[in-house]
Image (cartoon, grey):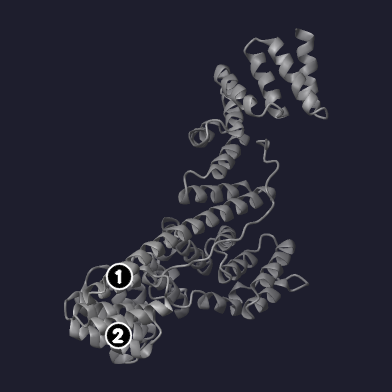
Amino acid sequence: MAHWIFQNINKNISPTMRNHLPFSLRRYHLCLWGFFILVLRQDNLCQQIPTKDWLAEGKKQIAEGHFAEAVAAFNQFKQTAPQDPRPYFFSGIALAEAGHLSAAEAELSEAVRLDPNQPEYLLAHANVLTRLGQKSLAVRALALFENDANTDRLSTAGLWQLADVYYRLEMAEQTLKILGLIQRREPRDSNVDLLRGRALKLTGNLDQAEEAFRNCLDKSPKNGPAHFELGKILEQRNQTQEAKAALLEALKLGENNPEYLHELGAVCLALNQVDEAIGYLERAEHIGSNLPQISYALAQAYQRKGDRAKAAGYLNLKKVQEGNMAQREKEIREEEETSLVTLGEEKLRQGNRSQAQALFEQVLQVNPDNWQANEYLAKIHLNSGQWQEAKPYLIKMEALDPNASEGNFLMAYLYYHLHEFALARQYGERAKAVQPADAELRNLLGNIYLKLGQPEKAFEEYSAAVQLAPDRTDFRTNLESTSKTR
């Protein structure tokens, strides 16, 4: 059994998750890291550079798209300047670019800790948290930008990134505010109107959203996403002919976009143009073949056409695709949990328990039933003598697996230190029934029986502990002390 004092930690780092979202979940998305790459050239972040310029080397590797090499260079820089936030920041960018979001979050969190007033660090951290689905933490990370002075410090590229993060967090009011700042700097940028229309749709204001999309098209007639958004609003208003015209314009500008094809197929079905709908939907199926919404639309189309066999086939395919998507989402969540636990273990090996604790707590936000995270958090609090803080995690572990030896051992340790020796004995004996060869446990049971006034039983347990771990002088001392008082 793994000892509770952080021994036998798994050193194998599992692959971290990547985002795999169906097109129906995608939203207007600017270059995620373009703004942060600009920071590579900012002089105001410069500090004294060690003799070997690993920081410059790491930046060069990022610019060339060699993200693993970049992280390795930044790790070298950390050896010479462990309190410099820059290598953590740039490592976070490199890891996020490579799709390792959990690792990126840990690096960016450290950059923010070392320099909490640097807006670029906070924005990068919030962006990764948003991509990880940690919305409440992302909102908290953006608190600095409630102060207009901090927002004004951002470049226009930085403001775009902030607006995009706010939008993905569905914070429409804040998105619109930042877009107003961008428009004052770039009054002819049609993308301001595009994102403004999308933000207004979040508020349910379709009239103003439509106006924004039309303003976008006045400035940039070949903006496919604006035609598409306009088409969807017109479809919502049952202006199906006008919606079809707008969607056809979008398709001219993005002929292989499955979202455009799917929406156009749906509009054609509403117009009872079944064959045309099937044509668009089959094209969409070819491009995005694993999307259940396309299969469902094709099932509807063939049902109307009277081809029940094909309709049934597509309905069955839809069910299979939904099952596959659910399984993939489950796998992504599990990969994310494993990655966070591995990072937490790494922080423990480095002696940084506060960061480790934050990572394990993050795991429980994703999955409160994660055994490892509950176990590590219990151990952290037990190791610090925070008995009551450890208790909820131990209770959760007992609920998940009441027969687990490690869980019962830790519960016995807790109740021993709370001077509830009868309960401590109960849990200790449960653990021994599963793992009698655990020397730590047998020594703990010796301590418990001694407190219960049963020196013979204590001697028996101490003897077992010494036999199992003859090099432990503390166990031998307990045995010798008890033998004198028997």
**Picture coordinates of residue 349, whole percent (x, y):** 69, 49
Please state which of residues 4 and 121 is positioned toward the viewer in this rendering: 4
**Picture coordinates of residue 369, whole percent (x, y):** 48, 43
Q: In this view, does 197 lie above or below 334?
A: below
Which residue occupies 60% across, 19% down? 425
Q: Quick one: which residue is furthest to the right in this view?
A: 471
Q: In this view, does 378 lie above or below 61?
A: above
Please state which of residues 335 and 473 is positioned toward the viewer in this rendering: 335
Q: Is residue 208 visible?
A: no
Secondary element at tag 1? helix
Mark 1: give few (<14), some (14-19) or many (20+) Cα within 10 Å: few
Please state which of residues 16 and 190 is positioned toward the viewer in this rendering: 16
Please indicate whether residue 282 sits to the left or right of residue 35 in the image: left
How many marks can you see? 2
Which residue occupies 49% across, 74% down? 32
Q: Name the image quarter holding the C terminus.
A: top right
Q: Distance between the residues labelled 2 and 1?
A: 35 Å
Number of the label disc, if any, that sits on residue 309:
1
Mark 2: give few (<14), some (14-19) or many (20+) Cα within 10 Å: many
* Amino acid type, residue under disc 1 in the picture: Ala
Sequence-wise first label, 2 or 1: 2
Displayed quadrant of residue 102: bottom right
* Amino acid type, residue under disc 2 in the picture: His
Q: Name the residue under label 2.
A: 227
Please state which of residues 35 and 476 is positioned toward the viewer in this rendering: 476
Displayed quadrant of residue 271: bottom left
Q: In this view, does 221 lie above or below 50?
A: below
